[in-house]
Amino acid sequence: ANGIVHVAAKDRATSNEQSMTISGQSSLDRDIIDQMVRDAEVHADEDRTRREEAEVRNNADNLVYQTEKLLTDQGDQLTDDETSDVTEKLEALKKVLDGEDTDAIRSATEALLTSSQEFGQRLYDAAAQQAGDAGMGDDGFGGDDDVVDAEIVDEQ
C-alpha cells in the first residue's frame, strides 16, 4: 500500500507465487534534501555567472571560426587595410580567449564583430551592385529598346 507499484505472479502449475513492490522512497533524509536545496540557492549567482562566461567564450570561439572562414573564402576581396584590421582583431581575440577575463573577451569580440560586419556589408553591397549591373543596358535601363506604351479603351 505504501509502494508505487506492487507486482505479483503465480505459477499455476507449481502454485509458486512471487511478488515485488517498487517504492518511491528516497534514501536521503529530508534534512539532507533541504540542505542540498539551500546550497543550490546559495550558488545560483555563481552558476549564472559561469553560464554567462561560457556563453561569451562560445560566441567568441564561433566568431573566430566564422572570421577565419571568411578570410579563407573571401580574403582576396579584402583590401590590405581591411585584411590587416581584421587579422589584428582576430589575433587579439584569440589571445584573450587563452585567458580568463570575460570582459576582455567580450570587448575583443565586439571589436572583431564590427570589423567583420563592415567587410561583410561591403561584400554584400558589391554583390548587389554586380547583380544590378548585369540586368542593365547601355542607358542604365533594361536592354529592350522596342518598348511600346499602350492603353486599352473599351468603346461600347
Image (tube, grey):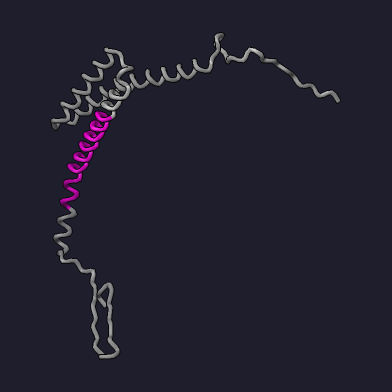
Residue 122 position (above or below residue 98): above
Query: Which residue appears at 18% of the width and 27% of the height?
Result: 94
Query: Which residue appears at 23% of the width and 69% of the height?
Result: 24
Query: Which residue appears at 22% of the width and 28% of the height?
Result: 106
Whether residue 54 appears in magenta in the rendering, the answer is yes
Residue 77 position (above or below residue 9): above
**Placement of the C terminus among the 4 image quadrants:** top right
Q: Position of residue 98 (x, y in %)?
A: 14, 30
Q: Position of residue 7 (x, y in %)?
A: 28, 78
Q: Position of residue 148 (x, y in %)?
A: 69, 15
Which of 92 and 103 lies nearest the eye of the viewer? 92
Quarter of the image for residue 86 reads top left
Whether residue 31 appears in magenta in the rendering, the answer is no
Which of 142 and 2 lies nearest the eye of the viewer? 142
Give the extent of the magenta segment: 38-65
Left or right of 76? Residue 136 is right
**Placement of the N terminus among the 4 image quadrants:** bottom left
